[in-house]
Image (tube, rainbow, N blue to C red):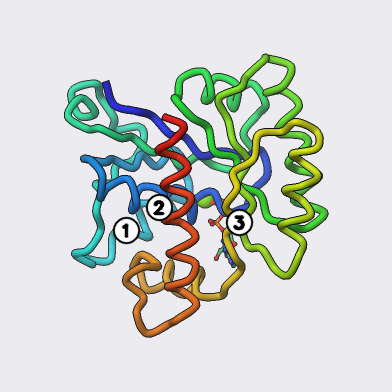
């Protein structure tokens, strides 16, 4: 059975697609990996990976096209979801995954969106999730991570730093580790390798 890692947050624009793509890029080096894009309207993950670049380590498919026959040969399945999921959707997502990654940016608005997301998970006694703080600037991410940990919210140790290279890589339709002309892209890619290692420790 493939290990399923889903990426979700009730709030939009918090780094779900960026995280799903780069977690898949890391897992793809460890085993056969499929990224399922459940954001029906935007298909941002499929879009990011569809520019013809040949260094992607994983396959991509719209979630609706998934069948048990298709997923069976894979070792890892990563699911990117859309923002504005209902709390119930996230609970069932977690229940159907080995691990749910909940990315959040380190600003106040994202932190409030995070509380909305985590409440239904806590109420349903879901424990197989980890918050991931992304787009970290200065000490903000560290502060948020500490605040979450103090409230016993499970949070990954790695902080993904903020860089405009993320948007540029999406536009170029390449992964951050292939964006060799941008040294910040390489640093964010290293952050995601560290995220990938943590993910593997939890599945
Ligand atoms: N580490 C980062 N540094 C800087 N900008 C980032 C970072 N991660 C994501 N972003 C930017 O934040 C925006 C949202 O990122 P992304 O598309 O990954 O989020 P999302 O949660 O999938 O959004 P949506 O809800 O629209 O699907 C994008 O413009 C992206 O470039
Ligand atoms: Mg997205």
Residue under the image location 22 percent in, 66 percent down:
52
Q: Which residue is mark 2?
A: 21
Which secondary structure, mark 1?
loop
Residue 159 has which mark? 3
Are the residues at dot 1 and dot 2 in contact (C-beta closer than 8 Å)?
A: yes
- Tag nearer the camera, 1 or 2: 2
Number of on-image labels: 3
Residue 49 has which mark? 1
C-alpha distance separating marks 1 and 2: 8 Å
Which secondary structure, mark 3?
strand
**Disc 2: residue Cβ within 8 A of ligand 1's nearest atom:** yes
Query: Considering only order in the chain, which callout, 2 or 3, is on the residue closer to the N terminus?
Result: 2
Which secondary structure, mark 2?
helix
Residue 139 visible in the snapshot:
yes
Quadrant location, the N terminus: top left
- Tag nearer the camera, 1 or 3: 3
């Amino acid at each position: 059975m493939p290990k399923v890692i889903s990426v979700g947050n009730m709030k939009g624009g918090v780094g779900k697609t960026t995280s799903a793509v780069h977690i898949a890029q890391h897992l793809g080096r460890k085993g056969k990996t499929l990224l399922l894009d459940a954001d029906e309207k935007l298909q941002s993950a499929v879009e990011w990976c569809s520019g013809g670049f040949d260094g992607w380590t994983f396959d991509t498919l719209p979630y609706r096209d998934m069948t048990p026959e298709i997923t069976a040969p894979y070792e890892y399945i990563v699911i990117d979801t859309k923002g504005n999921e209902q709390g119930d959707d996230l609970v069932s997502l977690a229940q159907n995954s080995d691990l749910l990654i909940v990315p959040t940016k380190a600003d106040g608005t994202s932190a409030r969106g995070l509380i909305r997301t985590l409440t239904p998970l806590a109420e349903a006694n879901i424990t197989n999730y980890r918050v991931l703080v992304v787009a970290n600037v200065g000490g903000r991410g560290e502060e948020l991570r500490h605040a979450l940990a103090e409230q016993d919210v499970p949070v990954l140790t790695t902080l993904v730093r903020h860089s405009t290279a993320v948007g540029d890589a999406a536009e170029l339709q390449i992964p951050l580790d292939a964006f060799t002309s941008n040294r910040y892209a390489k640093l964010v890619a290293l952050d995601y390798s560290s995220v990938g290692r943590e993910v593997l420790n939890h599945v």
